[in-house]
Amino acid sequence: MSELCLGTMMFGVETGEQASHQILDTFAEAGGNFIDTADVYGQGRSEEILGRWLTTRRRDDYVIATKAFGQMGPGPNDGGLSRKHILDAVRASLRRLGTDHIDLYQVHVWDDGTPLEETLSTLDTLVREGTVRYVGASNFCGWQLQKAVDVSLRNGWEALVCLQPLYNLLDREAEWELFPVCRSEGLGVIPWSPLRAGWLSGAHRRGMTGPSEGSRVKAGSEDGSIPWGGYATERTWRVIDEVASIAAETGRTAAQVSLRWLMQRAPITAPIIGARTLEHAKDNLAAADWSLTTEQVVRLTAVSAPETLPYPYNLLARFARR
């Protein structure tokens, strides 16, 4: 797979079809082959836009990932991870994508209303019939991920191959339990929101009292999903200051530095870039084919470290041997 994965959450929502296809063209021309979507993105419009683009390409050249869970209609079976919904959802995704198989099929979030065995056995069936090549998970906590791995192993079902978590210089909680599970069980990691919806793109600097107009930070602050006050902290400004300093040293943009740190961070496989515009896509793609120095990686890692760890991580850190 390519070093970067192209996320398509904005396709059909904030990014029109023509612009979406231009972004896909640019990604492919740069050597990208890993594309991530979900049925709930634009209530299917993202998959449809990607599907129409795929008709102009050789399907087997691309690794196409999508997800299931989101509510796709008003009915009680139009969401979740029941056998009924997964089977309905995968058929609908195949139709929208215009393909006979999905390379990576991910459960979008944990479903506490469906037995885990029902979900995992259904995913195993999809792999065995050839509809799905590999399966993964997104937005699980540590015990949920480990339980899914163990239940699949115990029953001889297809194992999860990757996790898609929130992870970036400002959100490093995945390091506490999720990454140890991934390393122990051999799962890849494809983090979403590597620039935290624009916080790490260079558009926001120390001294600002509110988000930039038209930014995703502004939208997130208004709808409450990413409140300004939750990130406008001294720790965030220190991280942004360091990113800007290294960007000046390397002649790169803040976004490229932030992405590059992720790309050099174990156990990351490929960050998911969710560009809204062609310009954003080009800037993000330039994070490939160069490297931060070891000293620069250390600086970014140190400045972004959480100021305090909750129990038991604070205690365990005192006894860590490596």
Image (cartoon, rainbow, N blue to C red):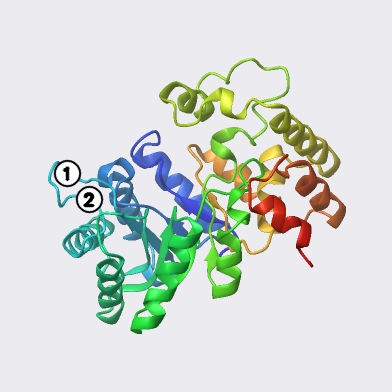
**Residue holding disc 1:** 73
The amino acid sitting under disc 2 is Gly
The amino acid sitting under disc 1 is Gly
Of residue 218 and residue 178, the one placed in the foreground of this image is 178
SS of the residue at dot 2? loop
Asked if residue 266 is positioned above or below residue 69 in the image, the reply reads below
Instruction: Name the quarter where the N terminus is drawn.
Output: bottom right
Query: Dot 1: within a 10 Å radius of its alpha carbon, few (fewer than 14), some, or many (20 or more) residues?
Result: few
Upstream in the sequence, badge 1 or badge 2?
Answer: 1
Residue located at (51% from left, 42% from top): 275
Q: Mark 2 and mark 1 in contact (Cβ < 8 Å)?
A: yes
Residue located at (42% from left, 65% from top): 136
Asked if residue 20 is positioned above or below residue 265 in the image, the reply reads above
Is any atom of residue 262 visible in this view? yes
Q: Quadrant of residue 54?
A: bottom left
Q: Is residue 181 left or right of residue 161?
A: right
**Residue holding disc 2:** 79
Query: Dot 2: within a 10 Å radius of its alpha carbon, few (fewer than 14), some, or many (20 or more) residues?
Result: many
Residue ranking furthest to the bottom: 156
Residue 77: percent from left, percent from top = 15, 52
Residue 101: percent from left, percent from top = 30, 70
Residue 17: percent from left, percent from top = 35, 41
Q: Is residue 242 left or right of residue 85?
A: right
Residue located at (38% from left, 63% from top): 57
Residue ranking furthest to the left: 75
